Image (tube, rainbow, N blue to C red):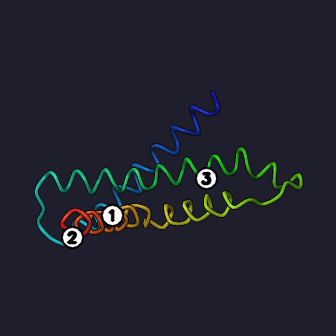
Amino acid sequence: MKEIVVLGIIFLASLCLGIIKYQTVLKEGEWKWQRKFAEGWNNFVNFFIAGLVGYYFMLVRWPLLAKGANIETSDFLLFAILTMGVFGHLNVLSYNITKGVEAILDRVLKK
């Protein structure tokens, strides 16, 4: 029951933070409804993933690290995902990776 409540709080917090970020990005210009939906969805998912990663880190990894377990590379990766998500840059990173892969595929397929 506790996990469901925490996931609900993460969901609501992600929704609120996604709406706040969406409102700041919306001021940049007039968009069609498709782009508005995609931007709102990306902002929500950004904060939701960060919340899930933070919850996992605090529930699973932190007790192990507190007992003296070794810090692994995955801990740094989780922390990087968490910080990028909390500050709202996770969806920007995924967009840039997608554009990079698209450019590489364009170059490879045109040859």
Q: Is residue 3 above or below residue 72?
A: above
Q: Nearer the viewer, mark 1 or mark 3?
A: 1
Label 1 environment density (alpha carbons within 10 Å; few <14, some 14–19, many ≥20): few
Could you give the CA–CA distance between mark 2 and mark 1, rounded to whole angstroms?
Answer: 29 Å
Report if the CB atoms under discs 1 and 3 are less than 8 Å apart: no
Residue extending furthest toward the right: 68
Q: Nearer the viewer, mark 3 or mark 2?
A: 3
Element type at mark 1:
helix
**Rendered image quadrant of residue 20:** bottom left
**Residue 72, image quadrant:** bottom right
Q: Residue at x 58, y 65 (%)?
A: 80
Q: Image quadrant for the N terminus?
A: top right
Q: How many marks?
A: 3
Residue drawn at point x = 54 percent, y = 38 percent: 7
Q: Mark 1 or mark 3, which has the lower sequence index?
A: 3
Q: Which residue is mark 1?
A: 101
Q: Residues within 10 Å of mark 3 (few under 14, many from 20)?
A: many
Q: Earlier in the sequence, mark 2 or mark 1?
A: 2
Mark carried by residue 27: 2
Left or right: residue 14 versus residue 96 is right
What amino acid type is highlighted by mark number 2? Lys
Callout 2: 10 Å neighbours few (<14), some, many (20+)? few
Question: Of 92 and 26, which appears nearest the observer?
Answer: 92
- For label 3, the residue is 54
Please name the amino acid that badge 1 sits on. Val
Is residue 11 or residue 68 the one in the foreground?
68
- Left or right? Give the position of 59 relative to 66: left
The residue shown at (26%, 69%) is: 103
- Residue 76 image label: none
Which quadrant holds residue 66? bottom right
